[in-house]
Amino acid sequence: MPASSTNTSTAPSSWQRAVSALCWRALPPLSVVVLVLLIWEYLIPLGIVPGVRAQYLGTPSGIAEAAAELARKGYGGHGLFDHVRASLMRTATGFAIAASIGVPLGIVLGYNQRIGAFLLPIFGFLRPIPALAFIPIVVIWFGIGEIAKVFVIFMTAFLYVLLGSVSGVRSVPNDYFRLGRNYHLSTFTILFRVVLPAALPEIFVSLRTAMALSWAVVVASELIAAQVGLGYLIQSASQVYAINKVYVGVALIGLVGVTIDFGFLMIERRMLHWVGR
């Protein structure tokens, strides 16, 4: 009995095994990151990269100092949080308008194939066009104010949301429609109670993709005479060769983008809890 109790006390618990497994999985990528940072910090400044001046490549320590300076002093007369907030507000506004129009319209066009036959080829033609191509036209239409910036984001998100919603509706099995008609449900009830729940997984995929693209496009939209925003920070800092501040702006865009995507994933799992079960 004493021997068995000793073996039980010394055996690793389940959470200890989980932590150990996590550490072993994290060790290879962390080792690569540390190695890259060390090379970047100590070897890159020696000029080993051909064709690029070492001072334009920055260093991890310089980026950390730039981040601390931006957090303390801000940039261009605005605090660092103000730049992040301005970009988030533009993205959220453009995406919200795109989703509120794109999802209902996509459901209608997916359900009514006669109307879709007229409009969907136009939207399909516009979707591959990059957001940068719209900027000169948008400036002519709306000037250089906030409406122009939001419209560029809206156009990018709207096309993906719309066509994703159409695809979601058209992937609903025909048996669902027949069942609704057999119960003499109205068209609105069929769309709201039958089609929408079945199409939601694909609609959420399009929303998530559109949100990621909206956040990426905010940099392009802030090329339109912006005075605050992460895109403005990156562009302005690059013009004076403040490369470390450019890296900070790029890193913030990536960090916020990952956070937004994770939030969407959590919402999707909560709202579509039946998917995959």
Image (cartoon, rainbow, N blue to C red):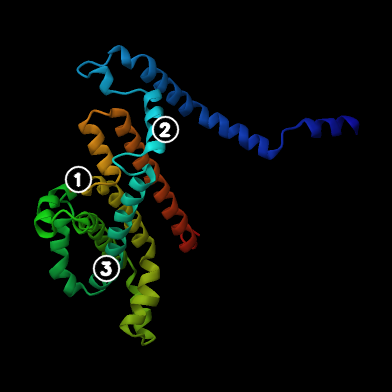
> What is the spatial separation of the Cα atoms under label 2 and label 1, in whole angstroms?
25 Å
| Circle nearer the N terminus (3, 1) | 3
Q: Which quadrant of the rendered structure holds the N terminus?
A: top right
> Which of pointers 2 and 1 indicates the residue nearer the eye?
2
Categorize mark 2 by other alpha carbons within 10 Å: few (<14), some (14-19), many (20+).
few
Residue 10 location, quadrant: top right
Categorize mark 1 by other alpha carbons within 10 Å: few (<14), some (14-19), many (20+).
some
Residue 66 location, quadrant: top left
Left or right of 127? Residue 168 is: right
Q: Position of residue 115 (x, y in %)?
A: 17, 74
In the rendered view, would you say 139 is above or below 44? below
In the rendered view, would you say 102 is above or below 181? above
> Which of pointers 3 and 1 indicates the residue nearer the eye?
1
> What is the spatial separation of the Cα atoms under label 3 and label 1, in whole angstroms?
26 Å
The answer to whether the residues at label 2 and label 1 have Cβ atoms under 8 Å apart is: no
Left or right of 44? Residue 37 is: right
Residue 77 showing in the rendered view? yes
Q: Which mark is residue 101?
A: 3
Q: Residue at x 32, y 16 (%)?
A: 44
Looking at the rendered structure, the secondary structure element under dot 1 is loop
Q: Residue at x 50, y 60 (%)?
A: 277
To which residue does mark 1 refer?
223
- Residue toward you, 16 or 38: 38
Q: Residue at x 35, y 47 (%)?
A: 84
> What is the spatial separation of the Cα atoms under label 2 and label 3, in whole angstroms?
41 Å
Residue 167 showing in the rendered view? no
To which residue does mark 2 refer?
68
Q: Amino acid at mark 3?
A: Ile
Q: Amino acid at mark 1?
A: Leu
Looking at the rendered structure, the secondary structure element under dot 2 is helix
Looking at the rendered structure, the secondary structure element under dot 3 is helix
